[in-house]
Image (tube, rainbow, N blue to C red):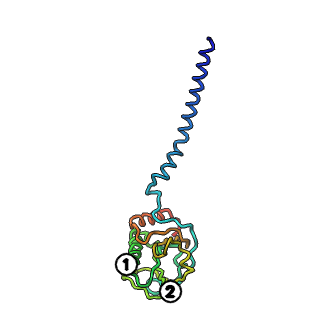
Amino acid sequence: MADRPAADTEVQRRRRARWTLALIFTVCAAPFVLGTLAYYFFPTAARTNYGDLIEPRAVPDVPLTAPGGARATLADLKGKWVMLQFDEARCVEACERKLYYMRQARLAQGKDMGRIERVWVVLDGGVPEAPAALVEGIYIARSAGRVFVEHFPAPTDVRDHIYLIDPLGNLMLRFPSDPDPKRVIKDLQRLLRVSRIG
C-alpha cells in the first residue's frame, strides 16, 4: 500500500510532463501554422501583385518610331520601365482602352512618371490610327514579327494583355487588357519605390 501514493505521483508527474511538452510544441508550431493559413487563405493587398508575374526573360531588340518621328530601338529604352501592348494599326475600342490605361498609369506616378515609357507594337503593316491624346509620347514598333511576339506569353492572344518590361530589358509582368486601373497603378508604385534601377 505504501507504494500506491508513489505510483500515483509518478503517473501525475508523467502526465504533467506530457502536457508541458504538448504546450511547448503548440506554442512553437502556432506561428508557422497561422502564417501558412494566412498566406494561402487570407492574402493581403500589400503583398499580392495584381499583374501576373512572368519568369524574367530578355526581350529582343526591335526598331521603334519615337515620339516626334525619330528612329529608336527598344534597347534605347533600357533604364526605364516599359509598358507595352500589341494591336493592329486600326486601333479599335479594346486597343484604345489599353492605350488609355497605359497613359493613366504612367501619369498617376506623378514625379516618377518619367521613369516609365509606353510602346505600342503594331501587328500588321498599316499606319497606326488612334486618338492623338492616347498616342502622344508613345513609342511605336511596326510589324515586329512573330519572333518578337513569341517572347510574350499569353494564354490566348498577346492583344489580351499589357506587358511590363523592367529597366534591364526583361519581361516581368502581364496585366489584362481591361485591367483595374487602381491596381495597375499600385503595382507600378510598389515597383518604382523599391527599384534601385530605372
> Which residue has dot 2 on it?
71
Kindly check if marks 1 and 2 are in contact, taking CB atoms under 8 A apart as contact.
no
User: What amino acid type should be assigned to the residue bearing mark 2?
Assistant: Arg
Front one among 149 and 68? 149
- What is the secondary structure assignment of the residue under circle 2? strand
Q: Is residue 195 visible?
A: yes
Which residue is most to the bottom?
126
Indicate whether 112 appears above or below 133.
Answer: above
**Taking 30 as reference, is 53 above or below it?**
below
Q: Position of residue 23 (x, y in %)?
A: 54, 34
Please tell me in which quadrant of the rendered image residue 107 appears: bottom left
Image quadrant occupied by the N terminus: top right
Residue named by callout 1: 93
Task: Pick whichever, 168 or 6, lies toward us.
Answer: 6
> Can you give x and y, in whole percent of width and height, for residue 191 in the image?
48, 64
How crowded pointer 2 is (Cα within 10 Å; few <14, some 14-19, many 20+) is rated as few
